[in-house]
Amino acid sequence: MNYYPEMHHILLGIQLLCALVGLFYIKELKNSYWKWFPVYLTFIFAQDIFWTLRPSEMRDFSEEYYAFVGIPVQYLFLFWLYAYKSLNNEKLFYSFALIYLLTYIPTELYLGKIDLVYSINLTVGTILLAFLVVMEFLKQIKNDNILEFRKNKMFYINIGVILFYIGTYPFFAFENVLSQEPYIALWNGYYLYFLLSNYSLYLMFTASFIWGKHPLK
C-alpha cells in the first residue's frame, strides 16, 4: 500500500496556509462567531503537525487520540457551525452532538476496539453531517442570495465538506476490506483521493476567508 508520504507534507503546508489566512482575517471577524473558525483551523494544524513529528514512543497513542479527541472535535465543530449558527437551530445542534457522542458508549464499554470506534462514529457523524449539508444547500437556494454564492462563506465550506467528509466515508467505512487482496489497488486509489480531497477541504476553507463576505455578528 502506498501512503504517499510526500503528499502528507504538502497537506500540512496547506493546513498551515489555511490557518494563517484565517488568523489574518480574525480582526475582521472578532465581533462574529466566525472568529472561532481560525482558532479551530489552528488547532487542527497544531494537532496534525504534533502527531506527524511525534516521538516514536507515542506512536501507539496517536490512534486513540484521533478516535477520542481529534475526530470528535471536527464533527462537533461542524455540527455547531452548520446547525447552531448557519441554520440557527440550537436544538438540532444539541441533538446531533448528543447522538454522535452516545456512539462512544457501546464501542468503548463493550467492544473497546479502535477500528470499530472509527467505523461506528464515522458512520453516524457522516450521516448527520450529510443531513446538515443538504439543509444548508436548501437554505442557500431558497432566496436570491444564491446569485451571490461567491460571497457566501458556507458555500465554500459546503463544497469542502462534501468532497472530504462525505466523499471519503466509504474509504474509512470499508478500509479493512479494501486493504486486503485483491483490493489493494482500489485502496491506493481511494487513499490518493483522501489526500486530494483533504487538500480541497482546506483550500475551500481558505477561499471562504478570501472571497466570502465577513458578517458583522
Image: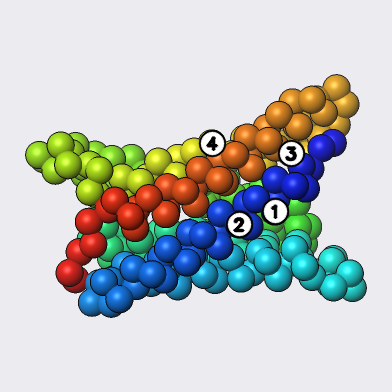
Q: Which quadrant is the N terminus positioned in?
A: top right
Under circle 2, the secondary element is helix
Q: Rounded to the nearest whole Å, what is the CA distance between mark 4 and mark 3? A: 14 Å
Residue at image mark 3: 175
Work out whether 202 lies above or below 48.
above
Q: Rounded to the nearest whole Å, what is the CA distance between mark 3 and mark 2? A: 26 Å
**Relative image position of residue 65 (x, y in whole percent):** 70, 68
Q: Residue at x 42, y 63 (%)?
A: 21
Residue at image mark 1: 9
**Can residue 124 be seen by looking at this rendering?**
yes
Circle nearer the N terminus (3, 2): 2
Q: Rounded to the nearest whole Å, what is the CA distance between mark 4 and mark 2? A: 22 Å
Circle nearer the N terminus (4, 1): 1
Discs 1, 3 touching: Cβ within 8 Å: no
Work out whether 18 lies above or below 165.
below
Q: Foreground: 21 or 111?
A: 21
Under circle 4, the secondary element is loop
Q: Which mark is residue 167?
A: 4
Q: Which mark is residue 91?
A: none
Residue at image mark 2: 13
**Identity, as a three-letter code, of the amino acid under mark 2:** Gly
Discs 1, 2 touching: Cβ within 8 Å: yes
Q: Is residue 69 left or right of residue 147?
A: right
Q: Rounded to the nearest whole Å, what is the CA distance between mark 1 and mark 3? A: 23 Å
Q: Rounded to the nearest whole Å, what is the CA distance between mark 4 and mark 1? A: 22 Å
Discs 4, 2 touching: Cβ within 8 Å: no
User: Total number of numbered labels?
Assistant: 4
Circle nearer the N terminus (4, 3): 4
Task: Work out which residue is located at the far top of the displayed protein and give it.
Answer: 182
User: Which of pointers 4 and 1 indicates the residue nearer the eye?
Assistant: 1
